[in-house]
Image: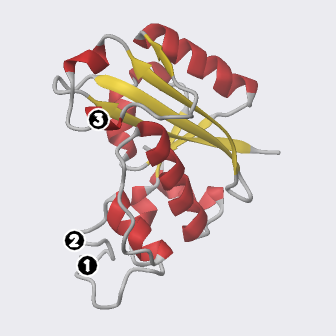
């Protein structure tokens, strides 16, 4: 069974990673297999725009330093034989996780924001000639379009956002190979 991971980071006021969420999924069905969530110490203590979303009641969370978190996540990904990392606006996460340069990085947004890849984009939406939305292509807007749930709100918790980004991939319905055009 081929697997991939969706990764999301949240940063503090100093633009340092304060949390990392990762979801492993099966490539064909896009069904979640496992997830991991790390809060990075001491970076989370600085605070950030989404600091109040860090803790999860009833969910496994590991609070540790960056080096240990990245080593544990890398070993966990290796145990699942994951080589492809997907993220929404992947250049942001890849820039903040240079230790993961050895993985293949793919950008979910590069498909989700384009009319030719996202059938849920309304015909009346303001798009560039390339088919890309001019605005309203963030996770929250796109998941609302695809799920038709206007009440959806992005939490800005790294592991919950990674799950939402996986849901965007599932709802878009593209095979993993289609994302090759969105290699970062």
Kindly state the secondary structure of the residue where label 1 is placed.
loop
**Which residue occupies the foreground of this view, 53 or 69?**
53
Residue 87 at what x, y percent from top left? Answer: 45, 45
Horizontally, residue 86 falls left or right of residue 81, namely left
Residue most extreme to the left: 13
Q: Earlier in the sequence, mark 3 or mark 1?
A: 3
Q: What residue is disc 2 on?
A: 134
Kindly state the secondary structure of the residue where label 3 is placed.
helix
Kindly state the secondary structure of the residue where label 2 is placed.
loop
Horizontally, residue 34 falls left or right of residue 66, namely right
Within 10 Å of disc 2 (Cα), the crowding (few <14, some 14-19, many 20+) is few
Q: Earlier in the sequence, mark 2 or mark 1?
A: 1
CA separation in Å, label 3 and label 1: 34 Å
| Circles 3 and 2: CB atoms closer than 8 Å | no
Query: Which residue corresponds to the image point at 48% horizontal and 81% vertical from the top-left?
Result: 119
**Which residue occupies the foreground of this view, 166 or 46?**
46
Q: Which quadrant of the structure image shows residue 28?
A: bottom right
- Quarter of the image with the C terminus in it: top left
CA separation in Å, label 3 and label 2: 30 Å
Within 10 Å of disc 3 (Cα), the crowding (few <14, some 14-19, many 20+) is few
Residue 1 at what x, y percent from top left? Answer: 83, 45
Query: Which residue corresponds to the image point at 25% horizontal and 78% vertical from the top-left?
Result: 127
Residue most extreme to the front: 57
Q: What residue is disc 3 on?
A: 52
Q: Which quadrant of the structure image shows residue 171?
A: bottom right
User: Which mark identifies residue 127?
Assistant: 1
């Amino acid at each position: 069974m081929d697997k991939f991971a969706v990764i999301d980071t949240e940063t503090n006021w100093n633009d340092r990673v304060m949390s990392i969420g990762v979801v492993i999924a099966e490539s064909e069905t896009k069904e979640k297999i496992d997830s991991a969530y790390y809060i990075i110490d001491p970076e989370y203590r600085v605070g950030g725009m989404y600091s109040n979303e860090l803790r999860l009641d009833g969910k496994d969370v590991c609070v540790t330093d960056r080096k240990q978190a990245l080593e544990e996540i890398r070993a966990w990904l290796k145990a699942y034989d994951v080589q492809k990392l997907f993220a929404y606006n992947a250049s942001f996460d890849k820039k903040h996780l240079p230790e993961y340069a050895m993985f293949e990085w793919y950008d979910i947004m590069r498909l989700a924001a384009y009319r030719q890849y996202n059938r849920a984009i309304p015909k009346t939406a303001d798009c560039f000639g390339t088919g890309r939305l001019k605005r309203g292509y963030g996770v929250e807007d796109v998941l609302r379009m695809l799920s038709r749930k206007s009440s959806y709100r992005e939490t800005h918790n790294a592991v919950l956002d990674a799950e939402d980004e996986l849901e965007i991939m599932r709802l878009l319905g593209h095979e993993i190979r289609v994302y090759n055009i969105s290699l970062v």
